[in-house]
Image: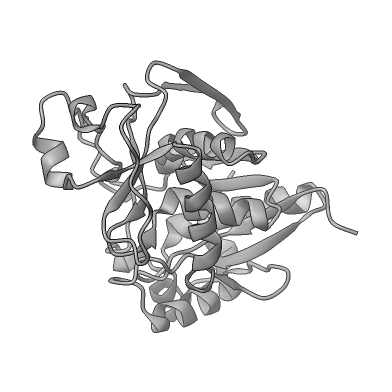
Amino acid sequence: MKPSYIGRLAPSPTGLLHLGHARTFWAAQERARAAGGELLLRNDDLDTARCRPEFVTAMVEDMRWFGLTWAGPMLTQSTRLLLYRAALARLHVAGCIYPCARSRRDVLAAAGAPHEGDEADEPVYPPQFRPPADASLPSLTDPVAINWRFRVPDGETLTFTDGHFGAQHAVAGREFGDFLVWRKDDVPSYQLACVVDDDAMGITEVVRGADLMKSTFRQLLLYRALGLTAPGFYHCPLVTDEKGVRLAKRHDALALRTLREQGRIPGQLRVDWK
């Protein structure tokens, strides 16, 4: 019988996992246990320039050392490109996307493209760069050799209730703009791959860091455009270093592998977590 709660762990093997990852993954495990559900493991390895096999091995070993468990075999995104391409085709037929030859530098340099200092997030795409809504749409090529963007409904307020932070809202076209769904190197964006996989895996709640809150609004639009039911969302507060900077994979001192080699005990690392 399928459990009523299915969560997931979805690390990306672009470096060693750190204590921030562990705290988010532990929250995911605790929520699954409390609901009598299960966790699945997904290897988000679409960043071919940075993903390395040794990081896949390390992330599995380090998560098991930390006390994380999951059901079934690991799902690997790079083996699922046909599923993502099928979703792209559906968006294309629906007229939800358009080709984009503009670079990130173009977008950042354009007037009316606020970025608000958030380097981890996409800048707001300038409306003057998007083609008219009634412009003819070129066919998808194989392989894809140009970026494709999702056209957001300007001015629409999107809302959802976060399991940790409560009611959330964002205005499309103001707080986030047209976003990438497929890259010119013929790889799906995080937004599209995440939606397709979370739906295919039957995920009922996505537990992840608060830095991905804005991505949730983009993904809600993709769920709607693809006719899929969105899961619940629970965004965890970010873990910061002694200077208040959120942890990144460059924080080697707080990498799980480093802590493990130092003889640290996972239970002791979790003692102050709430």
Residue 19, image x, y percentages: 44, 60
- Using the rendered view, name the quadrant where residue 253 is placed: bottom left
With respect to residue 135, does 70 lie above or below?
Answer: below
Q: Which residue is at the far front?
A: 136
Residue at 34% across, 30% down: 176
- Using the rendered view, name the quadrant where residue 111 is placed: top left
Residue at 73% across, 69% down: 71
- Using the rendered view, name the quadrant where residue 119 is placed: top left
Residue 188, image x, y percentages: 41, 58
Residue 61, image x, y percentages: 53, 79
Q: Closest to the observer: 265 or 207?
A: 207
Q: Determine if residue 271 is in view.
A: no
With respect to residue 260, does 141 lie above or below?
Answer: above
Q: Quadrant of the N terminus?
A: bottom right
With respect to residue 10, does 157 lie above or below?
Answer: above
Residue at 32% across, 31% down: 177
Using residue 53 as the reference point, say whether residue 90 is left or right of it: right
Using residue 203 as the reference point, say whether residue 139 is left or right of it: left
